[in-house]
Every structure is written in C-alpha cells, then in structure tokens.
Image: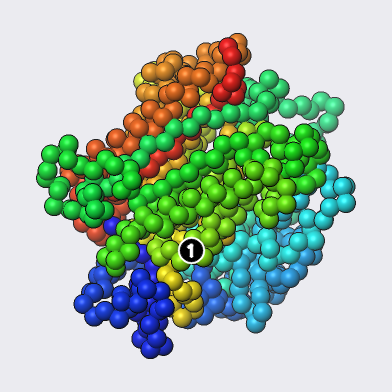
C-alpha cells in the first residue's frame, strides 16, 4: 500500500494553528488521538529527484562562487567530482553564470544563449527565487507550438510571435529539474544524463544552493587543454578529412535502408488506433470495499474480480475534435485547423492511493472523479468542435497536462478528499505522434518491430545470436515515473484545504498537473502501446510484457516468425488487419492483466516490486497484490470502416 500526502501535514497544521480543518471528512481525523501515524520507511539515501523550491527550508539560491582552484590538482579524471567541471567552466568564463528573469522574452533569452554559448539557464523570480530552468529545447518547443503543431504554419498569419513568450511560461518547472551534487563523480553524472536524455543539469550544493549548470559539452571539454582545440596540430587531427563536402555530390541515404522512423510517401496517411481495456481490483478486496489481507491463503476462485471495487479508474475518448472544423488550413492556429477534420483519441488511467482508507476516506472516489472529469471536459470540447471553449487554443502536445489540470480543479471544487497518480495521453493520427502527461508511478511503454538487418547495431539485439532470436520486437520507450521515495509516488490530491509546501518542510507529495512528466513520441504503424497503472509494472517485467505481445501478434498473424518485411508487404497490398485488431486488442489487455494478477499472488517470485524493494533495504518476497488497469493500443494504417 502506498503512502498518501497530507496526513502528516494535516497534523502539523493543526498543531501549529490550533484550528481544525473545516472539511467534515477530516475534522474527526485531525482531532483523533487513537489513530497512530504510519511508521516511516527505512532511512534511504537522498534521492536524485527534481529540485524543490521549498527544500531545506527555502528556495534554491543563485549562485555561490566555487572554491579557488588547487594549484597541485592532479590531471582530470572521469572519477573527479562534477564540481571540478563547473569550476573549470567558470574559470574559463571569468565570471559567475548569468541567470534569466521569469519575465524575459524568449527572444532575449535566445540571444543570451547564443552570446554565452550556453544550452540552459536557471530562471529567477522575485527576490532571486529559483523558479526553473530554460533550455534551448524549451524555446524550440515554444516556436513549434506557435507556428503549428505539424510545422505547417509559418507565423505569417498575424498571430502572436512565439518568441514574445516569457521564460516563466516555457521553462521546465523547478520541481521537474533533475540535478547533480558537487561531490558526484563526472562519469556518474554523465551516465545519469545519458539515461534520462538530458543535455544540462544544475549543480545543487547543500540541497538549496545552485552553483551553476554543467552540460555534456562541459564534461567533454573537461581536462582538455586549449591546445587540444586550437592550433595547427589540432586542426590536422580533428578537421582535415572531416570537412569540405560538395553539395552537388552529397545526398541522403534511402531512409528505408537506414531503418529510420521517417514515413514513406505511402505511409504518410493518417494512422488509426484500436484499443482494449482490462481491469481487476485488488485480489483481497471485499464486497464492502475493505482489504482482507488474511485471504491470501484462500482458494483463487474467491479472489475479487469486480472492477467496481477497484481504486483504479480509466477513460477513453475517441474522435475528439479540438479546433474549428474548417476542413483545412495552414496550421496558424496552433496546428489545429488542418487536424480538426481528423479527430484525436484520448486515453487515461488513474490509481487511487490506498493509504487514505486508514483515515476513513474511500481511495477510489478521487481517481474515479478525476477520470470522469477528463472525459467530461473532452466531451464538451468535442460537442462544440472546439468553438469558444477555454481549451480551444491549447496546442495538442499540451492537451494531456491541460485536461488533467482542469479535471483536478473540478475534483477539488467538488471537495472530494483523496489522491491518485494519473497518466493521460492523446494519439495524433494525422501527425503520427503520441503526447502524454504522467504524474506518479502509472506509465506507458511503446513496443516496435525493428528489422535488425537494416536498423544498425545500435538497435540490434546484440546479446542473443540471430538464429536464436524469436523476433526483433523491441521496447522503444518507457515513460519516466515520479517518486518521492520508494513506493511513495507524487500525486494529484486534495485534503479539503490547500497545503502550503513551504510550511510542509518539503514533505508534501502533492503536485500540480503542470509538474507532470510530459513527452511526445513519434509513432509508427504496427506499434503496440501499453498504458497501465503500477499493478502491471510492479508485477510483470517489461521483457515478459514483450513476450506476451509477441505471442499475441503471432496468434492473430499480425506478424509471422518475426518477418518484418513480410508484414510490410501485407500492408502494401492493402491488408492492414484493422478489423482483426479491433477484436483482438482487448484480448491483449486481458492477457496482461491476468498475468499481473497471477504474479501478484505468487509469494516466491522475484517481481519487479520485490527486486526494487530489496535495493532499498526493504525485505519483500513475491508479487505486489494491487488493483490493475491496462489500456492496450494497436496502431494501424486504416480506419475501422476500411473494407479490404
């Protein structure tokens, strides 16, 4: 059972103010003396988690000068602390790193980035408070959204210039910024950045002082003498033979030969998706909604199967029109005009935090109302084809987080007590993209067949001989989770009153939807996307998910013997198997859900949850019984009405 946010915070608030919360569901809780606090988890090392403006009693500060260099310093090594890289960088610059104001225009920020040759800057608010970090990617994303989500607009339609936006509007919020500590080794910081796809990280001292920002380029140049970059020898070693291409004699290789994701002319048509949903409640859930952990030894036939008892919730909303249906356009309205005639498909899951049950709060109410309001809001947008709706002008890539935020606000206005993790995604068929916002430990994975004969060594399975491989089905993406500590995810929630994170001493695990992990993925025909709550990922290893999906594909002949070329030939002949996919995709979701249930009841297996628990010094054996909700998506090239 996972921990929820505000109960310790609630007690501190009562002790500090002497007042009892006004909400009826919490009044008795705050004043009761017979409710014992949950024991804390075993002490863990400080996690590398997003920065907090309230950590350690106050906001991060900018910037303290680094210590003076040691004249007897040994030659640079990857095992040197990352603070040495920052020190060298600031020595070369001759001055502390500048920071941006939250009200600065993106145009001004971009000029500063170019002038200083820097890829990222911290963003400051009133009183020097660190609000976030702005990167070059953030600026490019703002420009993309401003000229049209599909890149078809040119900004010449009289609309607002995207570079007039401010740093505060487009920065990465401070709670989402991943940082490094001064004492961490260079190689470890580089490895973390590589795994997370980061180009820059701030260096945080004492949990609250930002010393500066280190980039991959800074680490590459660390320990290199200026003579390594300039002079005749450096030019001969580094430049000769690597420059001087002639445009008339230079062309791009055939994309298919490189196995790239760029679609051919025939595949540029809109992609379509079939979806299947499966859900099971906690196996020990009683008809009254209580957990009876003593039922672990009873017959399997008596395990709970009624989805109405589940603390998970989900929604699906197909064919949602997000903009004015004018049948075309140049994308000047944010990429909506052209896509309006080709609706979007939304999906979402939420997992209620079971710890609320200990305090007389039904954990499923919050998650169910959140998903209800997500579906309601999208229905209202679709009813008016996006006309005159407050969310009509939101770029598609930001819709998941925006819808999640609006639904969260609606739940708070209903005064529903509780909290949950959530994941909301939109499938953009016309542009072959998936956009999502994930908060907590629900998530999604994307599986794709990679033809290793043309994909290159980077994407090949290099551990299993070709003759022994069953297929080239690969995990191409796994969403990032957000945890405060082991088994304690960040959540959307409500206690009946707003909680000030500053007064909560950084213990608050509630987050806003704007602080969710947002990303956009390029999707290809034939991809399989699995969105699920942690009931799946805690009990089923991702490699086992791949095996189940492959078995399902072969059973329904979506692919035979892992032959990607034969599958592509079938598609080229006009057989997209969409009708079969519509029938079969719910079966895939059910297979995964049943496997998660079986593994959760196995007291001896090394489940993903058990392995991670042991890594955090918590003794746990077997699976993790929990609610489980799965949405399986299969990407096709023809709509459901297509006739072969």
Give above or below for 128 relative to 297: below
Instruction: Indicate the secondary structure of the residue bearing disc 1.
Output: loop
Residue at the image position 67 percent from the left and 25 percent from the top: 269
In front of the other: 100 or 187:
100
Residue occupying image coordinates x 60% and y 18%? 642
Residue depicted at 53% across the width and 21% down the height: 578
Nearer to us in this view, 117 or 383: 383
Left or right, residue 236 beside residue 375: right
Instruction: Give the left or right position of residue 422, taking residue 338 as reference.
Output: left
Q: Which residue is mark 1?
A: 414
The colour scheme of the drawn protein is rainbow
The percent coordinates of residue 96 (x first, y second) are 67, 75
Q: Write the residue at 29% across / 42% down.
A: 306
Question: Is residue 290 depicted above or below 301 in this figure?
Answer: below
Question: x, y percentage for residue 640?
Answer: 56, 23
Residue 146 in view, yes or no: yes
Estimate the x, y position of residue 311 in percent, counting from the top left: 35, 51
Please state if 308 lies on the left or on the right of 573 as rendered: left
Taking 72 as reference, is 586 left or right? Answer: left
Q: Position of residue 401 (x, y in %)?
A: 57, 54
């Amino acid at each position: 059972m996972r921990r929820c946010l505000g109960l310790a915070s609630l007690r501190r608030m009562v002790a500090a103010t002497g007042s009892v919360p006004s909400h009826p569901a919490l009044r008795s809780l705050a004043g009761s003396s017979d409710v014992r606090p949950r024991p804390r988890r075993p002490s863990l090392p400080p996690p590398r988690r997003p920065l907090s403006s309230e950590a350690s009693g106050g906001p991060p500060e900018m910037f303290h000068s680094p210590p003076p260099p040691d004249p007897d310093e040994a030659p640079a090594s990857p095992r040197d602390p990352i603070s040495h890289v920052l020190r060298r960088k600031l020595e070369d610059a001759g001055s502390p790193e500048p920071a941006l104001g939250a009200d600065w225009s993106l145009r001004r920020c971009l000029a500063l980035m170019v002038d200083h040759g820097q890829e990222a800057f911290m963003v400051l608010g009133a009183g020097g408070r660190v609000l976030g970090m702005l990167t070059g990617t953030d600026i490019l994303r703002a420009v993309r959204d401003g000229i049209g989500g599909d890149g078809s607009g040119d900004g010449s339609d009289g609309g607002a210039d995207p570079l007039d936006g401010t740093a505060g509007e487009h920065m990465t919020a401070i709670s989402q910024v991943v940082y490094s500590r001064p004492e961490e080794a260079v190689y470890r910081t580089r490895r973390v950045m590589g795994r997370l796809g980061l180009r820059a990280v701030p260096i945080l001292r004492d949990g609250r002082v930002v010393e500066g920002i280190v980039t991959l380029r800074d680490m590459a140049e660390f320990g290199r003498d200026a003579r390594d970059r300039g002079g005749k020898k450096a030019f001969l070693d580094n430049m000769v033979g690597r420059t001087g291409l002639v445009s008339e004699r230079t062309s791009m290789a055939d994309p298919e030969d490189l196995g790239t994701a760029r679609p051919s002319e025939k595949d540029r048509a809109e992609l379509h998706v079939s979806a299947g949903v499966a859900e099971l409640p906690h196996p020990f859930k009683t008809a009254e909604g209580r957990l009876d952990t003593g039922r672990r030894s009873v017959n399997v036939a008596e395990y709970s199967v009624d989805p109405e008892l589940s603390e998970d919730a989900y929604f699906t909303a197909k064919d949602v029109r997000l903009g004015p249906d004018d049948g075309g356009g140049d994308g000047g309205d944010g990429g909506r005009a052209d896509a309006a005639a080709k609706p979007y498909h939304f999906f979402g899951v939420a997992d209620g935090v079971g710890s609320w049950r200990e305090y007389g709060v039904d954990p499923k109410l919050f998650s169910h109302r959140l998903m209800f309001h997500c579906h309601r809001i999208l229905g209202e947008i679709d009813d008016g084809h996006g006309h005159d709706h407050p969310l009509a002008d939101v770029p598609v890539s930001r819709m998941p987080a925006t819808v999640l935020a609006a639904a969260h606000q609606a739940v708070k206005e209903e005064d529903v007590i509780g909290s949950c993790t959530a994941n909301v995604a939109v499938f953009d068929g016309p542009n072959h993209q998936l956009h999502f916002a994930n908060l907590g430990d629900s998530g999604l994975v994307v599986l794709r067949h990679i033809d290793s004969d043309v994909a290159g060594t980077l994407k090949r399975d290099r551990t299993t001989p070709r003759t022994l491989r069953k297929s080239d089905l690969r995990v191409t993406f796994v969403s990032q989770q957000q945890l405060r500590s082991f088994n304690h995810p960040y959540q959307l929630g409500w206690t009946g009153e707003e909680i000030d994170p500053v007064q909560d001493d950084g213990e608050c695990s509630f987050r806003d939807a704007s602080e969710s992990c947002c990303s956009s993925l390029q999707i290809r025909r034939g991809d399989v996307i699995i969105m699920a709550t942690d009931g799946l990922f805690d009990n089923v290893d991702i490699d086992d998910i791949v095996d189940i999906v492959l078995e399902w594909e072969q059973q329904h002949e979506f692919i035979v013997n892992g032959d990607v070329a034969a599958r592509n030939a079938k598609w080229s002949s006009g057989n997209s198997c969409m009708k079969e996919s519509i029938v079969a995709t719910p079966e895939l979701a059910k297979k995964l859900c049943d496997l998660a249930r079986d593994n959760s009841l196995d007291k001896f297996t090394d489940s993903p949850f058990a392995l991670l628990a042991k890594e955090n010094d918590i003794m746990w054996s077997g699976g993790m019984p929990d609610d489980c909700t799965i949405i399986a998506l299969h990407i096709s090239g023809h709509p459901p009405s297509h006739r072969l």
